[in-house]
Image: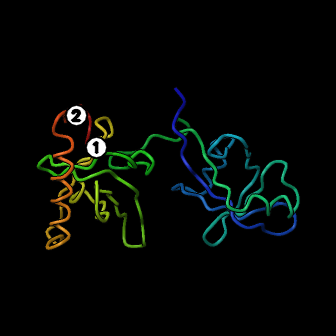
Amino acid sequence: MMSKLICVARIGAAHGVRGEVRLWTFTEDPLAVLHYGPLTTKDGSRSFEVTKAREAKDHLVASFKGITDRNAAERLNGVELYVPRDRLPETDDDEYYHADLIGLAAETTAGAPLGRVLAIHNFGAGDIIEIAPPSGSTLMLPFTNAVVPTVDLAGGRVIIELPDEIDGEDRASADESASAEDDAAAPNSARHPRESGDP
């Protein structure tokens, strides 16, 4: 079975006249992209080898094998680069790749479905988990141990402790979403068991 592809970088504008590009990476160590082997587009139609890279203010300046002039570099602007999930290092406890979280079912601590994880954001004040309910607006919650006490990758779910500050219409909306998904799933709903070693 083919490993899931993870987006690790996005190519930006050309830098200089010798084929270098600005490269925005989505890895903890920006220079780690040098060690992942060939990077590909999402559809696998193109492959890129980073030959050298250096850190700039908020990005890398990188060179790719076979890209030797500004015109060729400009044509790469906006290309996203992927690697198979199994090439990435294992995470520590309480660390997760965003791609492993997206799509997981979200449940309250009482077991009521809330929806699915849509995205993980960071606007400068910590990670935010965005949950898409079956209907209505998405929920934006702090991705902390207090609000997300359990991430069960094996079971395909996250457990959410709704904060007290989510009240009024927001809490009502969350409760309605849970109720609506409960009704939809009632005929054949199944709970995934917590497996040994899960957080």
Check residue 10 in the rendering and tell me which mark sits there, or answer none: none
Residue at the spot of label 1 = 157
Q: Nearer the viewer, residue 44 or 184?
A: 184
Q: For the point 45% across and 40% down, which residue is it?
A: 90
121 in relation to 6, above or below: below
Q: For the point 50% across and 41% down, which residue is it?
A: 89
178 in relation to 194, above or below: below
Q: Secondary structure at mark 2?
A: loop
Q: Secondary structure at mark 1?
A: strand
Q: Nearer the viewer, residue 138 or 102?
A: 138
Residue 92: x and y in percent read 38, 45
Residue 38: x and y in percent read 69, 41
Q: For the point 64% across and 44% down, which residue is it?
A: 35
Question: In the image, is 96 to the left or to the right of 162?
Answer: right
Q: How many marks?
A: 2
Question: In the image, is 14 to the left or to the right of 84?
Answer: right
Residue type at numbered disc 2: His
Q: For the point 26% across and 38% down, which residue is it?
A: 198
The reply to whether callout 2 and callout 1 are in contact (CB within 8 Å) is yes
Q: Nearer the viewer, residue 174 or 53?
A: 174
Q: Nearer the viewer, residue 174 or 17?
A: 174
Question: In the image, is 116 to the left or to the right of 73?
Answer: left
Could you classify mark 1 by the number of other residues whose Cα lies within 10 Å: few (under 14), some (14-19), or many (20 or more)? many
83 in relation to 76, above or below: above
Could you classify mark 2 by the number of other residues whose Cα lies within 10 Å: few (under 14), some (14-19), or many (20 or more)? few
Q: Give the quadrant of residue 153.
A: top left
Image quadrant for the C terminus? top left
Residue at the spot of label 2 = 192
Label 2, label 1: how far apart the Cα atoms are: 8 Å
Mark 2 vs mark 1: which is more N-terminal?
1
Residue 86: x and y in percent read 52, 35
Residue type at numbered disc 1: Arg
